Image (spheres, grey):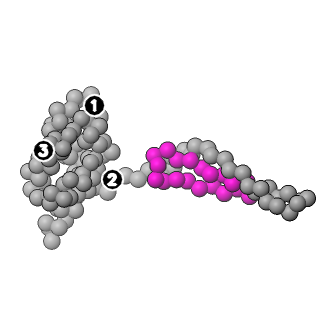
Amino acid sequence: MASITASSTSRPRQLAVVVNQVKCFSQGRTNLSFTLRPLSTRLRVSCAAKSETVDKVCAIVRKQLSVEKDKKVTAETKFVDLGADSLDTVEIVMGLEEEFGIEMAEERAQTIATVEQAAELIEELLMEKAK
């Protein structure tokens, strides 16, 4: 009996695929059966940006959107989940530009949807600025 385990990394909920191969001796055929079962989280990918940058972005987002103190804002937080619309996102980008002394191209600023994406873009722009 063979067993193969694979995990899906594109979905937040990971599943293992177990393939059991059973040989039928009388007919010479192979029957395959698949079983899906949840996997425990073994690997966690963290934000590529510095924690200080993420913290500043969280503070700016919290201020711009008037987020209550008891609501948690992390790198994975989406602006939409905090009630932001497109105008709010523009204001967040303006606040980030002012705080970090950078300018974001409109096309790039429109792609920002999470705190993590904003922090990573800021780090990238700061590195370009330093060159």
Disc 2 vs disc 3: which is toward the camera? 3
Task: Specify the segment rendered in magenta.
Answer: 1-20
- The reply to whether residue 78 is visible in this rendering is yes
**Identity, as a three-letter code, of the amino acid under mark 2:** Cys
Query: Looking at the rendered structure, which numbered label has been put on residue 91?
Result: 3
Check the picture and name the quadrant holding the N terminus. bottom right
> Which residue in the structure is indicated by mark 2?
47
Considering the image in quadrants, where does the C terminus appear?
bottom left
Is 34 contained in the magenta span?
no
Of circles 3 and 1, the one toward us is 3
Compute the Cα span from label 2 to label 3: 23 Å
Q: Position of residue 9 (x, y in %)?
A: 48, 53
Q: Which residue is mark 1?
A: 71
Left or right side of 34 for 87: left
| Main secondary-structure element of the magenta-colored stretch | loop
Separation of marks 1 and 2 at Cα, in angstroms? 20 Å
Helix or strand or loop: what does disc 1 sit on?
A: loop
Q: Position of residue 105 (x, y in %)?
A: 14, 60
Label whose residue precedes the other's in the sequence (1 or 2): 2
**Number of other residues with Cα within 10 Å of mark 2, as a class: few under 14, some 14 to 19, many 20 or more:** some
Q: Residues within 10 Å of mark 1 (few under 14, many from 20)?
A: few
In the image, what residue type sits under mark 1?
Lys
| Residue under the image location 33 percent in, 53 percent down | 47
